[in-house]
Structure formats: structure tokens, C-alpha cells
Amino acid sequence: MEEEMVVLIVGAGPAGLATAACLTQLSIPYVIVEREGCSASLWRNRAYDRLKLHLAKEFCELPHMSYPKDAPTYVPKDQFLNYLDNYIDCFNIQPRYHTAIESCTYDEGRKCWAAVAHDMVTSMVVRYKAKFLVVASGENSAQNIPMIPGLSSFPGEVIHSSNYKSGATYSGKNVLVVGCGNSGMEIAYDLASHGAETSIVVRSPVHIMTKELIRMGMTLVQHLPVNLVDAFLVTTSKFVFGDLSRHGIVRPKIGPLLLKSNTGRSAVIDVGTVGLIKKGMIKVIGDISRVKGNIVEFEGRKEHAFDAIVFATGYRSTTNIWLKNGESMLNDDGLPKKRFPDHWKGANGLYCAGLAKRGLAGIAMDAKNIANDILSTID
């Protein structure tokens, strides 16, 4: 038996929920499926305890619903999840949980997307036929842990940042954090604050900013050229943090906002990590060469012993595993071929939301564009 629908949304994270809400506002029927047993599973099940939205709340709203007036400027994880729950209730979004899309192919003869799904509760096969398909399964689908020679010989704990909750269990241990993005830097701070001997691998140049600076920059860039705003941000961050190169942290040659626009790489919002690095409570180390038991060898043949390794090395998309005709929109990594803001639409009624590395603001833009485009096609 095959169920027909106008729009099939795959994924009930913020991108899928935002798209569902925008379709609801335009009275366009849809079905939204989610392989996990809850919405926003990355936030509910794979986020560390101290996580807050790194950007001010005005840059993190989903379409058609603001945060409560008493919400803090930088919203903690639990309050963000409450916001999402209220969002689901407000727009009467009813995701079909435990439903994993196993394949989805465009049927040229019937001019529709034919999807085969697995109901993980009943073990039944479910078939869908949709005129439009929205890929909202996220760029953070699967853990990305780099291949490091000898890693399998490490006797201690090796985890991805998605499984990290708190530094409380690591007090007194030697812990290595691999990755210097926002997650890696914040996890390093959390570990050191809980008494762990903490080291962090910084492999590439990175901008370090305060949350207030980024908020100001994102406001100014709406009125001034990005190169001027970037120059202001870099100059001010130098004044705030000083020269970090002697601590092993080098700034990129491109400014933070332009770098984000061109590559999707975000500046690191400092939560206190830089202060602990300057005090020597967090050691900055170069790239890993190999692992020999509990000994990790770094570039320059430096060696250190560790009890645990936390990989804050991001995620990868798994969309191409189940989407069979997505080449009009996605590359081999399951990410958009076209650059923002033209990335969200493919051929034959195929769309993607939340894959442009533009955060919640980008998700809101994608959702509105997709719903409006579907409406114009239907009309």
C-alpha cells in the first residue's frame, strides 16, 4: 500500500519543523517523518549539558514564532527545547517518529518521489508517494571521527562530542580534545573547570570572538559592507584577547563573517577557554601523527599520555545513502552543490532545508523559500 501526499519532509529537527510550519501557514498539506523517537534529537540526546545557543536569540528564531520576552539573550539548551516543543504545538506539527527512510527515488513516469520507509516500531515497510520532497535530515547526521594511525590501540575512553555530557566524570584525568570549533573549545573549558588535565588539538587557523562582538557584527553587517565589519571585529578581538599566536592559535587571513559566508566555518565564541589557555590550564597542541597505546604522538614527535580522547570533529551528512536522485542539488558529501542563497532547490520538486551551514537563521530562510516556491508551483 502506498500513501500519497503533496509534500514529504524527511527529518524533524529545527529545519523540518520550520518547513512544516511555513507549509501550514500556506495551507499546504505535508507529512513529516523522523527516524528517531523525538524531534530535534541532536539537541535532546547528543548535546553537552552546558550548551547554549552561540548567537543572540534574535538570530535564532524559527519562522512565525518569537522567543518569550523573558528568554535570555543567549538561550540555554533546555529553554531552546521548550521553544521547539511550543513551536510544534503552535503549528500542530505531528511528526511520524521511528520512521526511517531507506530509499527515495524520483519516478519519471509518475512525476513523483517514491519513498520506501521502515517503521521501526512495527518493523513494517511503508511506502510514500510525494509531489515534493524536502531533505531536512541535517548536515549533522553521523559522527565524523578522523582516521588516525593506531587509534584502535588506545586503551582509554574514545568518544565523539555528541556523547559528551559533562566534565564531572573526568576530574584528575588527562583528556585530549581534538577539534577547535565551538564544541571543542567549550568542552575543553568544561573539562578544565572540572579538574581534568586538558589539552586541545588546534589544527587550523580560527577566529576567537566574544558573543557580544558577533552579535554586534551580525547587526552591523545589515547596514555596512562585510569587509568593514570584519575589520572592526578582528581589530576589536585583538584588543580583547591579545596575540594568541604564542599560545598556538592563529587567525585566518579572511575575516570571520566573510569566512562564514564563503566556507560555512564559524568563529569560536569564547566561553572562558582563552583565559584558561593563557593560565596554562588548557594546553594547545598541534596535529596528531599517531597513537601508540595510551601515548599520542603529535607533529614534531612530541608525545603525551592520555586517559581519554574527545573528538569534537563534527558530523557528516548521510542523505546520499537513501536519496537516489539528488544529484541536481547535492554533491557527493550530501551537501548543496550551489552556494548560499541558491542552494535550497533542486530539480523535480526536490528541496533541502538546513544544509547551508547558516544556523537557525539560515534554516528560517530555507523554510520560507521552500514553502513559497511550492505554493507558486501548485498555483
Image (tube, rainbow, N blue to C red):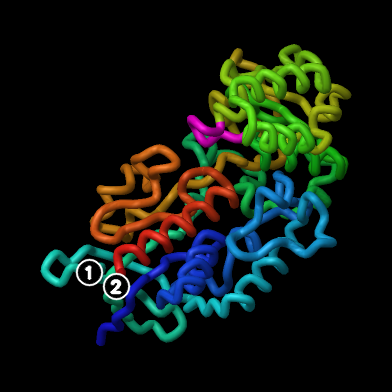
Is residue 264 located in the magenta-colored stretch of the structure?
yes
As drawn, the residue found furthest toward the left would be 109
List the residue tagged with mark 1. 112
Mark 1–mark 2 distance (CA, rounded to whole Å) = 6 Å
Residue at (62, 52) in percent of width and height: 162
Is residue 354 located in the magenta-colored stretch of the structure?
no
**Residue 45, image quadrant:** bottom right
Residue at (28, 70) in percent of width and height: 131
The quadrant in which the N terminus is found is bottom left
Q: Position of residue 145 (x, y in %)?
A: 52, 42
Q: Amino acid at mark 1?
A: Cys
Highlighted range, magenta? 260-266
List the residue tagged with mark 2. 130
**Residue 303, image quadrant:** top right
Q: From the viewer's perspective, is residue 350 above or below residue 90?
A: above
Which residue is more in the foreground, 264 or 37? 264
Which residue is more in the foreground, 216 or 251? 216
In contact (CB < 8 Å): disc 1 and disc 2: yes
